[in-house]
Amino acid sequence: MPRFRYQCSSCGQRFRREEVRYLCPQCGRDYRPGMPLTGVLEAQFDYGAIRKKFRKDKPDWSLFSAVEKRFFPPIPVGNTPFFQSVALGDELGFDSVWIKNDGLNPSASLKDRASFLVVAEANRLKERTIVAASTGNAASALAAICAAAGKRALIFVPQNAPKAKLVQMILYGATVVPVKGTYDDAFRLSLEYTAKRGGLNRNTAYHPLTIEGKKTVGLEIWWQNNWRVPDAILVPTGDGVIIGGVHKAFCDLKAAGLIPRLPRLLCVQAEKSNAIHRYVETGCYENAAHPDTVADSISVSIPSNAHLARRAVLDSGGFSITVSDDEILEGQRILAARTGVFAEPAASAVVAALKKLRGSKRLLRKAQIVLLITGHGLKDVEAAMRSIALPAAVEPALAAIEAALEARSAKGVR
Ligand SMILES: *Cc1c(COP(=O)(O)O)cnc(C)c1O
Ligand SMILES: [Zn+2]
């Protein structure tokens, strides 16, 4: 049995895992659609036991897991590459830039981590159907893990979700319901659905194990960084669950006495989807009125985990920054051209943010910086096409090719 209690992040009350499923029964009662969640639950482990048992020469990560290994779905998730890019550091003006490439998960986004743990929980609870609202990636992740686990995924997505993500969900065998409305509408509808019809709801932050699942990326960064804490981690932020999960990872490690300090967490949002950014900067929460951005995965009007996301930034000594769509697409091109990593726009936002921070006192040149690349670029090729032109075809003769190449170099095009 994993040793943990759920603790309400609003009132501090503790619960056994059998006593609660989603939000704190008291604080969650105040929740109304149209605002960030209140009473989000956090798993608190027996940190003294972890301290005694955890060994770096033979790390037992199940000590940090809220679901027993025997319930894990039969599909490997995580253990994605972590590496330094000198070329990207040179381009952006920082000495030590590292990439955690979570686009290389099975469904090509970090969301697989949350879906993995929630589906494990569904195995434990013997729930057959898992329901989620998603801008795309959470749903394609849930569909993939459900396919592997033999479960039914019921998914509500806004009708404008990128095609590749919809194709993924359907190919994995999920039941997909595109909703004529926003992600926030889909979120509300999925809560109404599970309240009435049952099944396990995987909505981000609403199910506490979405935070715990995303936490694993933070544990991996520590391990892959030779058990050192990087100075800063840039996190693309929509609902604020990834940044909350990364924070939770390092809080768990610190509580277990395994690390001396937290990394600074830098919240990166799109200019028009900036509710958490403003909340961090001003202390006052307000929805983002028109969260219109090319970075669909971080396009959120009402970020469900706004409260914990703000706490993650402030508690870690980090800060928040926004980037425009043009900057995001430029970040996408820089990342691809300098590192060979093709990231979707949401993930590329962190590259844009780092470019903006060049020469800033807020982030020193010599700091060890981690860019959390959360999703693969092939998920949204149309977005990338906005900032490039495909070359025209030439006659199949060497002379024609030479002429075309010359014309291009004259224009300064590759
Ligand atoms: C979901 C997602 C994010 C944002 O995560 P939140 O937990 O909503 O803040 C960032 N990038 C990608 C690719 C995502 O799918
Ligand atoms: Zn509470």
Image (cartoon, rainbow, N blue to C red):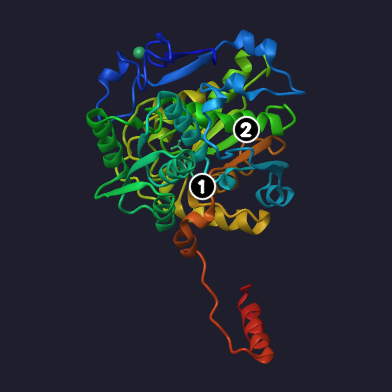
Q: Which of 180 and 404 is in front in this view?
A: 180
Residue 107, disc: 1
Residue linked to disc 2: 232
Question: Does residue 234 appear to the left or right of 151 in the view shown?
Answer: right
Whether residue 210 appears in this view of the structure is no
Q: Residue 47: percent from the left, percent from the top? A: 60, 11
Question: In percent of the image, x 62 and y 89: which residue is there?
Answer: 396
Question: Does residue 46 appear to the left or right of 366 in the view shown?
Answer: left
Give the mark toward the camera: 1 or 2: 1
Q: Which of 151 and 11 is in front in this view?
A: 151
- Residue 352 vs 191, above or below: the answer is below
Residue found at the very far right of the displayed protein: 57
Q: What element carries label 1?
A: loop
Q: Residue 28: percent from the left, percent from the top? A: 30, 19
Amino acid on which the number 1 mark rests in the picture: Ser
Q: What element carries label 2?
A: strand
- Whole-Å distance between the Cαs marked 1 and 2? 27 Å
Q: Residue 148: percent from the left, percent from the top? A: 49, 42
Q: Residue 249: percent from the left, percent from the top? A: 57, 24
Question: In percent of the image, x 36 and y 22: which residue is there?
Answer: 22
Question: In percent of the image, x 40 and y 58: which residue is there?
Answer: 163
Residue found at the very far left of the displayed protein: 196
Question: In percent of the image, x 51 and y 23: which residue is there?
Answer: 67
Q: Quadrant of residue 368?
A: top right
Question: Does residue 378 appear to the left or right of 336 in the view shown?
Answer: left
Q: Nearer the viewer, residue 13 or 21?
A: 21
